[in-house]
């Protein structure tokens, strides 16, 4: 499937962008899940990256066991290295489309991964199979089109951003994925589907503002090379977008709104 291969290549997480994942924590970056996990639950985190949020899940459900799965061996090796000592936590390399587990987990989580999949429904189907009857599927993701920066960033970045979203869409990725998940879950027969806003709103007065507001610049600096290689922007356009954006982030940026939804559904008994 040529389109799927292209999406998989584009989804490959650039190693130099791993800092974005490393800096996340369950309590700050997936509040709805943090409030929902219970001691003793068996959890799978699909697309766990460096395991930063997965480790938070292990802490909350201990002695329940948590498995982190990711298609990227380099990120998983970092996850092992950093969190391998946690007793109730294990990591394994694997692709969500090839998930074979059946009725094994109380909770299956997929955070910020569906946005990278050209075939979200078969992926959701695999995760539903992996749930025990009565188990819950948690999906957290973006609607990239609804992201808003205040004041608007430089036009060079807006141009890069528009081309970046087109590069993603060409590979079959849904830029507004957050707003489709509830319907897909219902289509798969999940019940009690609930949507909880998890928007990331960062303001200049926040302690971590300077780190968080860099995200679009980091994407252009790291993933941007793939966008250039695919012919969607020139290297010059990428560089100038990064440069102007970094200057804007340091001096002008006031607020960043990322639109994220957590969608949860229950597998019928
Ligand atoms: C944006 S990161 C999200 C990491 C983490 N869940 C978080 O919220 O910080 C997306 C992750 O999905 C993984 N991924 C992408 N496609 C995948 C697939 N088909 N199967 C499993 N993992 C995949 C990537 O390797 C990457 O680690």
Image (cartoon, helix red, strand yellow):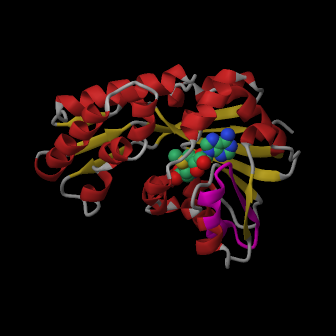
Q: Tell which residue pokes out farthest to the left in this image.
A: 251
Residue closest to the eye, 217 or 269: 217
61 lies left or right of 17:
right
The answer to whether residue 208 of the structure is visible from this angle is yes
Q: Position of residue 226 (x, y in %)?
A: 45, 37
Kindly identify the residue that appears in the image at 57 percent across and 43 percent down: 12
223 lies left or right of 195:
left
Figure check: 103 above or below 59: above
Name which quarter of the figure residue 138 lies in. top right
Figure check: 177 above or below 26: above
Q: Position of residue 187 (x, y in %)?
A: 72, 21
The answer to whether residue 253 of the structure is visible from this angle is no
Could you tell me how many numbered marks the image carries? 0
Q: Is 170 in the magenta?
A: no
Residue closest to the eye, 251 or 262: 251
Kindly identify the residue that appears in the image at 39 percent across and 29 percent down: 164
122 lies left or right of 258:
right
Figure check: 92 above or below 218: below
Q: Is 74 in the magenta?
A: yes
Residue closest to the eye, 75 or 123: 75
Q: Quadrant of the N terminus?
A: top right
Name which quarter of the figure residue 231 lies in. top left
Kindly identify the residue that appears in the image at 18 percent across and 33 percent down: 152
Kindly identify the residue that appears in the image at 18 percent across and 57 percent down: 205
Q: Position of residue 105 (x, y in %)?
A: 80, 52
Q: Position of residue 203 (x, y in %)?
A: 23, 50
Residue closest to the eye, 160 or 85: 160
Q: Quadrant of the C terminus?
A: top right
- Which span is picked out in magenta? 58-77
Figure check: 67 above or below 72: below
């Amino acid at each position: 499937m040529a389109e799927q291969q292209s999406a998989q290549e584009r989804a490959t997480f650039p190693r130099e962008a791993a800092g974005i994942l490393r800096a996340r924590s369950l309590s700050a970056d997936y509040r709805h899940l943090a409030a929902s996990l219970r001691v003793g639950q068996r959890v799978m985190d699909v697309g766990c990256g460096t395991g930063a949020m997965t480790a938070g899940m292990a802490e909350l459900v201990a002695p329940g066991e948590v498995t982190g799965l990711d298609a990227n061996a380099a990120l998983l090796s970092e996850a092992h290295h950093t969190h391998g000592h946690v007793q109730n936590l294990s990591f394994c390399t694997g692709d969500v489309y090839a998930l074979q587990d059946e009725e094994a987990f109380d909770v299956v989580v997929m955070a910020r991964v569906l946005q990278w999949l050209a075939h979200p429904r078969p992926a959701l189907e695999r995760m539903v199979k992996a749930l025990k009857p009565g188990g819950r599927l948690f999906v957290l993701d973006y609607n990239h089109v609804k992201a808003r920066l205040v004041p608007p960033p430089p036009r060079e970045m807006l141009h890069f951003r528009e081309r970046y979203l087109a590069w993603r869409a060409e590979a079959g990725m849904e830029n507004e994925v957050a707003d489709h998940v509830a319907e897909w879950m219902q289509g798969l027969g999940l019940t009690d589907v609930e949507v909880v806003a998890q928007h990331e709103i960062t303001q200049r007065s926040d302690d971590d503002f300077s780190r968080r507001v860099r995200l679009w610049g980091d994407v252009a600096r790291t993933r941007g090379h793939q966008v250039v290689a695919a012919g969607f922007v020139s290297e010059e356009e990428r560089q100038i977008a990064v440069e102007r954006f970094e200057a804007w982030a340091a001096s002008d940026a006031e607020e960043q709104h990322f639109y994220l939804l957590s969608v949860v559904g229950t597998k019928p008994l």
